[in-house]
Image (spheres, rainbow, N blue to C red):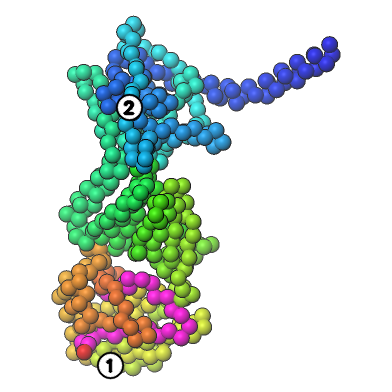
Amino acid sequence: MKKTISALCALLLCLCCALPAQAYALKVVDHALYTDIVAKIDGHPIRSYNIRGYTAVVAEDLRGYGFWVLWNAADRTLRISRALKDGEPETPTSWPVCETAPLTHRIGARAKPVYATDIVTSAAGSRIESFNINGETLVWIDDLAPFGSVVWHPEEREITLTLGDPVQLALAPLIADLEAWRAAGGSGSSYETYPCQTGTLLVTRHTGTPHGSSVRMLFVRKNGDRVSINDLLPAWPLGSASYLSPSEIAFDEPGHRLSFLTPVLETSNGDVRGLGVCKCTMDVLNGTLLSLEPLSDGLTDWGLTLSAAGDAELGQSLLLTVKRSGAEVTAVGRTFPGSALDVSLDAYGVRIAHYAALWDGAFEASAYHAAYEALAALGLPDITLGGGRMNTAEQRAAAARYVRLTLNGTPVSGDLFWSQGNNHRDLYFAPDSPLALRDGDTLALSVGVLP
């Protein structure tokens, strides 16, 4: 008997300890209201409620309407995505029967309590708001828009979801936004799509942004889930969109892995450092970065500023030569056309600052000044005017007659654009890839009227 009493006491103690969590789970936070609105998916009614003036449907019911609703008890998540068959969105061969009972209560009266929940619910890979009613999860039908067109029909008192292609539904508005941006001034903006067996990758390039350009990569799976490739890359203060420049984009044969080359920057202990051009490999099904491999041991964490001060010789053109020796990059030769400018170089480009107040007759008569005037007439973009920084092929060819950057004698390709600061106008050269210098490499800059 004593053993029974002790066991009972232990049980009661356990129940008492469990009460706070249970009390939280059953905490009423709202009420579902009676409504005469009928919700339909592809013309087939589905159970619905009115919560806060919006129509909500039962997430678990979606399994019969062409969706996967996946519950993960370990991390308490509920994921909603389109069902697939043979890799393509599936339409049910038979639909659930949902008979709408006659409304016997006043519209807007409280129907059922809505309880607090710690379950994280997502649709198409994005978190959405959810509710708990009698142990079932409710979501607003509007949040299912990534899977189709949600339309309110006031005369019929119906709200309908018409299913569509999740990939096209995700990509169409993004492409439309880019086209609108291009028409508004970002003339160099562009996009490419890369379909594979499991979905489609969209790469967008916006020019005319405050920091010159912005590149984003989004993978949309065929079930509608979205994976931001930018979010998988190392972060730095201006975001990965400002350094991302993908090339050699490829998928493996099953369409599970994405690989591409891009320059990469990262922040470590508050310092920004360049990793050079890296091969990035992503798992687009799990949304994870598998590997990031620098392709060379070239030094990208370098930079120096040079001016006419010191032992620089005066000349008709700007001629600079820098060389890496060990971990140091130093100037080994420089000729300046006067004191009206200074030059900054690093792995990500060259900036020439022009101080018009210091121009004199000798400077204006120099070959450098003639090149400056010719470049000003080329219509190069100006990032302070929202012009981006990308050049046309014609601008690159014309600018090559006045500006030349070589690495070990080989010309470096890139874009020229203008900017400005206090009392100076700046000419930038941004190479297509970071200037990763190996030991012994020589970088040479020439600006003038070139042969």
Q: Quadrant of the C terminus?
A: bottom left
Residue 425: quadrant of the picture = bottom left
Tag 1: residue type? Gly
Label 1 Cα neighbours within 10 Å, binned few <14 / some 14-19 / many ≥20: some
Tag 2: residue type? Thr
Residue 312 picture location, percent across and down: 36, 91
Label 2 Cα neighbours within 10 Å, binned few <14 / some 14-19 / many ≥20: few
Residue 16 picture location, percent across and down: 68, 20
On screen, residue 203 above or below 57: below
Image disc number at residue 107? none
Would you name the residue on which mark 2 appears? 93
Residue placed at 20% from the left, 69% from the top? 392
Residue 439 colored in magenta in the image:
yes
Residue 154: quadrant of the picture = top left
On screen, residue 429 above or below 406: above
State whether residue 77 appears in this view. yes
SS of the residue under disc 1: loop
Q: Which stretch appears magenta?
A: 422-450
Residue placed at 54% from the left, 24% from the top? 25
Callout count? 2
Residue placed at 43% from the left, 15% from the top? 112
Residue placed at 46% from the left, 20% from the top? 133
Residue 158: quadrant of the picture = top left
State whether residue 423 appears in this view. no
> Spatial distance from mark 2 to mark 1, Cα to Cα?
81 Å
Image disc number at residue 315? 1
Residue 315 picture location, percent across and down: 28, 93
SS of the residue under disc 2: loop
Q: Earlier in the sequence, mark 2 or mark 1?
A: 2
* Front label number (2 vs 1): 2
Front residue of this view, candidates 294 and 9: 294
